[in-house]
Structures are given as C-alpha cells and as structure tokens.
Amino acid sequence: MADNALPHVLVIGGGFGGLWATRALASAPVRVTLVDRTNHHLFQPLLYQVAMAGLSSPDIAAPLRHILRRQHNVVVRMDVARGIDVEHRRVRFDGGSLDYDYLVVASGARHAYFGHDEWARHAPGLKTLDDALHIRRHMLEAFEAAERAVDPRAQAEWLDFVIIGGGPTGVELAGTLAEIARHTLPREFRHSDPRRSKIHLVEAGPRVLASMPPSLSDRARRQLERLGVSVHLGKPVTAIDERGVDLGDERIDARTVLWAAGVAASPLGAQLGGDRDRAGRVRVAEDLSLPAHPEVFVVGDLAAVAQDGKPVPGVAPAAKQMGAHAAAMIRERIAGGATRAFHYRDYGNLATIGRMAAVVDLGRLRFSGALAWFFWLWAHVFFLIGFRNRLVVMAEWIWSYVTYQRHARIIIGRRDES
Amino acid sequence: MADNALPHVLVIGGGFGGLWATRALASAPVRVTLVDRTNHHLFQPLLYQVAMAGLSSPDIAAPLRHILRRQHNVVVRMDVARGIDVEHRRVRFDGGSLDYDYLVVASGARHAYFGHDEWARHAPGLKTLDDALHIRRHMLEAFEAAERAVDPRAQAEWLDFVIIGGGPTGVELAGTLAEIARHTLPREFRHSDPRRSKIHLVEAGPRVLASMPPSLSDRARRQLERLGVSVHLGKPVTAIDERGVDLGDERIDARTVLWAAGVAASPLGAQLGGDRDRAGRVRVAEDLSLPAHPEVFVVGDLAAVAQDGKPVPGVAPAAKQMGAHAAAMIRERIAGGATRAFHYRDYGNLATIGRMAAVVDLGRLRFSGALAWFFWLWAHVFFLIGFRNRLVVMAEWIWSYVTYQRHARIIIGRRDES
C-alpha cells in the first residue's frame, strides 16, 4: 500500500490516455487511483474484429488490475464517475466519493447520433465490447433470418447491410462484412445465398477516410468496391427505421444498419467548467491542464488540442502521448518545476479495409493494397497489450486468413435484449 | 439441395443427441432439418470454464451450420420450437411450421429450482453460454465490490460464495473458484484480500458426486477441502435471498450464490403426449421411439431410459449414443427392417475438481488426484469438436496452468441486465 501522505492522483478512464498516464506515474512520489466503469483496458483499434466475429472479447481486452498488478502505487477501482467538483477537488462515484490533489480526466467519447437519438435503436454504434457483441449478434442473426425467410424480398432485406460513416470504423466494417458474405458463409446456407448480400457504405462528405490525403481516400474507395461494397459519397442520412435508411430522396432497404458516423465527448467534460468545442471536447491549456485549475488535466478523445492550426486527431497514439505528458507535468509540478506545452508526434496514419487491402500514410511515403495490409497487421498486433494476446491474435489471423473462417461466430444473448 | 421426394427427418436440438443423430443420417436417403434456438453446438462439459473465466465462448462452441456444411442433406435452421402436433406430424416454430416424416426430439434440459422459481434471481444456474457469461460477470463483480467496500462485514459478504449442489457442475465451480480466489487474484487487489474468500459447497444428500462410488465421493470431498472449499453435506437449502442462503437453522452470508442443484427436462416433452417421469423426461420404448408414435424418437437428457434397472445418466456419451441409435432406427424403418433396443455402453465416469484434482471411475479401475486430472484433461480436449478449438483450448490451459492466470476475466454487460 502506498503512503497516505503522498499526493493523490485520480485518473478517470482506463483507455489509452488514462492507462498511459497511470503507467508514467509508476516511480513518481504519488498515490494513484485509476477508475474505469469496466474492469478492462480495451484495444479499441481491433474492436471491429470482435463485432465481425473474427476475435473474441478477451483477445483485445485485459483486466486493468492485471495489467497494473506490479505497479504498487496504484489502486484500480471499477466504478462509474457521476460528478466532478473542481472547487473542492472531489469526484463522486456510484460507490462513494474520492478526493484528489491532481485529476486526470480521460473518459473518452461515445458514438453520437447528432441529435437523432431515436436512430440508436435501429443503427447500433461501436465503442465498447458490449457494442461489439451487440453488432455481432445483429449481423449473424440477419443471415439466419434470411435463411428462414420464404418471401424473396424479405430475404433480400435481411441480406443487405448499410454502414453509415466513411471513417476508419465504417470502412473496416464494410470491408469485413463483404468478406464474410462472399467468402466465409456461402457454403453453409441452403435456402439463401450470402453472396447476394449488398453492403452499402454511406458517407455524408465527398470521400471516405477524410483524415487521409485525397489520393489514398480514392484508393480506399476503389479497394472497397473491388471487395463488393457499394460506396455512396456526399449522401447525408435523413432517416433510419427498422427496414432501412433514407438518403434524401433515395431509399436503401436493409434490415441491418450500423452506425459509424460520429462521436461525442464524454459528458464528464461538461462538469469541468471550462470551454468546450462543438463535439463537447474540453479546450485545455498548452500543457493539457485546465486554465482555471492547473491541477486538472484532460487527455485523449475528451481533450480539444490544436497543433499547427490543426486539431490533434482522436487516435490511440495521440491519447497515449497526452496521458504520458499529463503524468510528466504532474511530476514536474510536484518537483516545483514549470510545465511544458504538449507536442504531438504524428508517426503516420493507417486504415485497413479488408483482406489484403489497406492504406498507409507515413507523410512522404504512401502506399496501399497488400503491402499496406501487412504493415497494418504488424503494427496492430505489435501494439496489442499483453504477450499472450499478441500470440493468440496472430494465430487466429493466420488461421482465418488461410481458411477464410471466423472463429467467433457465436450468437450470445437475444436480439430483443439490449 | 436435397430431393423433396425423400422422407423428411426433423431434429430438434443441436446438442450431443441431436447433432449425433444428424451426422449419423449423412448417407441415409432422407432430407434432414436440424433446428436449434441458438446458432451453435456447445461442448457442455467445459461450460464451467467459460463461467470461471478460463475459456472464451468460441473455444467451446461452433456454429452448427459450419460443423454440418459438408453434409448436403441437412438444412440448419435457427428457430424456437413452440408446439409439436404428433397427430399431424407437424412442429410449430417462431418462424413458421415444418412437417416431418420422422421426428427426433433432443431438446435437453434446463436447470430447475424445484418449485422455487423465485430463487432464480439470486442463484443463477449454468446450462447455456448466456448463463456462463452471467455467472462470470457475477463472480468477477463480487471481487470488484469487495475491493470498493469500506465496511469489513460487507467486504466479507462480497468475498464469500455459496455453490448449491454437489454434482459434477457444483464440484467444478467450487474447486475452480477456490483456485481463482487463492492463486489468480491475490496480488491484484489493494484494499481486499481474495485469499480470505470462503467457498461453500452445499449438498442436500450425504455425499458429493452421488453417481460415483462412495470411495471416490469421499476422495473428491477431501480434494475440495484441500483446495479450501467448505463442504456442507446433508444440508438442504430452505431459502435464498440476495445476502445469502438458509440451510434450515443454519445461515451462510454471501452475496454470490450459484445454482448447480437440479435440472428439469425441456417443456417440449410435455407435448409428445406420452408418459413422463418426475423430472419431466419422456418414457420411451426400448428403441427410443414413442410407444404411440414409432416415427418419433426422443434422445439425450429429455429421454428417460432404464438399463439393468438403473437410469441411463444424463451425460454427453449417453446422448451421443442415443442420437446415433435413433438415426440407425430411422434408416432401419425406411429400409423396412425392424428396430432394436438401445444399449448404453458405459465407458466410465470422471469428474474434475480443480488444479491437479479429479476422480476417475472406469469400473474396476478407480483413481484420483493428479493422474486423474491429466486423464480428464486429455479426454475433454480430445472430444472437443473442431480441430482449431482443441489446439487453442490446450494452449490456453497450458498457459493458465503455468501462470495461474485466466485470460477471459472480462466483464461484459451490466449486473442489472439479464
């Protein structure tokens, strides 16, 4: 147990931002409490693989207290933060309140429906493991319903899928769904033909992967189309119901609609009293602290940080760097030193599309296709937390690559629940 | 697609009985429809490992249509049977009705509370993957709640566990829970000490593993006690609430109570119009058909079959043998031959208790301890369906054996759901 006289650092959120902040405080003269509403750290970049039945939940998640078991200045607590009182330096949780000397808020973002919360019922989003299992169930049950359907039109509606949002998650979901429909399932159905599935990717803006250079967006679109995905660009969604979506005058009938179009910052940001941007992100000072409360740091997807006039993107490397920076600044403050501005080091941008299809942007070096896919695979498996997971995930990918199979095609729970 | 003029065999249930019946009809001149409410075959003997966070769901489950993809005379359908009309040879499902020429009912059993359905809320049972994930969540959240608890008595209640029922499932759960509390978790908690967990195994009868010879029951009890389990024999449960259980005058306080005490046959048995035993199992003729309807066969846990004056036990080998026998009798009938009596070949009985602890009864040869445990491990991994699962499960067990870790310690869903 840590010395109670030491300053108490409270970290909210066990994602990349919060976990990296906690780890960077390992040898600091502080007590740390890391609180998350779940019991695990999630490797979010591979979450779509759980949704698409390629990986199991434990392949991409590890208990936070297991990851931190040897860091003796940390207490891990599974609890839900309900209120932050920056004046009295206290956070209220479901299971009681905790006082802090320094606070790191890393509670991230959720998917958001831009004021259309009623769409949530028909178009589930993907941010947590529960979301992923929910989408997996919808996807697998749609193929089962198609097999049972007697009417050809009803069958077609069950076989068709709409993915809304052409960012990395939407592109990953569309490409993987196309692969499942064309390669994984066909021989296993007798009354329906999964190869007749239509996979629609709908994007309001003019191109997919808008954070990439236009040339790579274009290559990504072409790779998607080669995999069998219909890409609809410049088409904002105007309505969603249980039978399909409206894009203005155009209608796409499909029983399964997935949402990958937008995120909103965690509501905890609103309790910090500072300035926020349109997506609810907290505008922080250069050193990532709150201007009015230098003992409070905001990191990861919840923080609005600009660099060279551009916002720092909501990606895992940025969250890790912010977490480590906040930890360093807390050490600096305790030592009586001055804090420094955060500087984001951008090592590049990559997105996967499907089997042997990806795009990679390393600044001067840009490439796509099979080489990009292997680069993406290596980078993601390399960064997976925990030695065992890395081996298992690698083995599972080699297996599914050779056989086209996806081992996690198990429907858990019922459609009408959750 | 199969020839529509061929006789139609409808199989209800994709467990050991139904799946083995279906496979044994591979080269028969029939069309087969296999219907299950889930999309997977479950390797039930390892289900407790999913509940105890040692294995993931896909490790012990495989999609039925994947298993049967090369058997072209089978249609797999995910649907729920609601009514059987033996007079008109028709079964009503949620998704429509199907007529049959031969019917194999293999819908198994559920856990049952002996008229105390109100106990279900406080003492979840273990029969499906959903049950296993529910128990996993309860178990992991209890340790999290203990870590948050301020009051020592509340903490003790969260650390204590009661398992009701001293059959194979109860013994497996108790032994594994003791291992988790003593070996897997201790270094990861700061405010609570999982080693102070008390694991109570409560059995109404005079011994655990009642289907084993008394000498092995006694050895199993001693092995459980060595692992740290308190075994309560001859103690029927009289009440269960959210804070613990009553055993007559005795009270055990515990926030987590698991039910492994009894099963009842599937309610579909009641629709067959025949005679049933006290647990709702259908009394079948010697050849496993219904006396009044020789075209209807009942196999697996739903069938009440006696041999040499003793009931055939509700275990996987018996269900597989019954399924294969029913299929052979259908072929015999179609060929115009006479049916034969089912004969159960009992190859022995084994039960695992925990790390290096098991009991094996092969008739003349009986043994327990480490050797029995390796024998059990070999037998179970060998029988796991699907080559990949076998390798992955083996690797996972070697890993958790060496490290004492359990990789699936991921809480999914919320306690107040399901």
Image (cartoon, coloured by chain):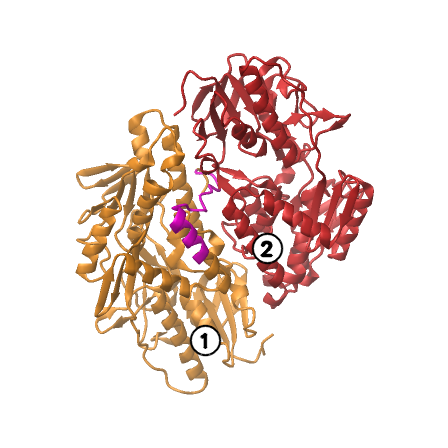
Chain colours: A orange, B red
For residue B392, say whether it is visible.
yes
Range drawn in magenta: A394-415
Secondary element under disc 1, as helix, strand or loop, is: loop
Is B298 on the left-hand or right-hand side of A100? Answer: right
- Residue B366 x/y as whole percent: 78, 45
Q: Nearer the viewer, residue A181 or B25?
A: B25
- Residue A202 x/y as whole percent: 24, 47
Q: Which mark is residue A24?
A: 1
Q: What residue appears at the point 56 percent right and 34 percent down from the top-left corner?
A: B15
- Residue A251 x/y as whole percent: 21, 37
Check the image and report above or below for B85 versus A323.
above
In front of the other: label 2 or label 1?
A: 2
Res B384 → quadrant: top right
Q: Which mark is residue B397?
A: 2
Q: Nearer the viewer, residue B381 or A311?
A: B381
Q: What residue appears at the point 60 percent right and 49 percent down from the top-left corner?
A: B49
Q: Chain of mark 1?
A: A
Dot 2 and dot 1 residues touching (CB under 8 Å):
no
- Whether residue A402 appears in magenta in the rendering, the answer is yes
Quarter of the picture holding the N terminus of chain A: bottom right
Report the number of discs.
Answer: 2
- Whether residue A35 appears in magenta in the rendering, the answer is no
Res B198 → quadrant: bottom right
Res A275 → quadrant: bottom left
Quarter of the picture holding the C terminus of chain A: top left
Q: CA distance from mark 2 to mark 1?
A: 33 Å
Crowd band around label 1 with a 10 angstrom C-alpha radius: few (<14), some (14–19), many (20+) = some
Crowd band around label 2 with a 10 angstrom C-alpha radius: few (<14), some (14–19), many (20+) = many
Q: What residue appears at the point 32 percent right and 36 percent down from the top-left corner?
A: A159
Secondary element under disc 2, as helix, strand or loop, is: helix
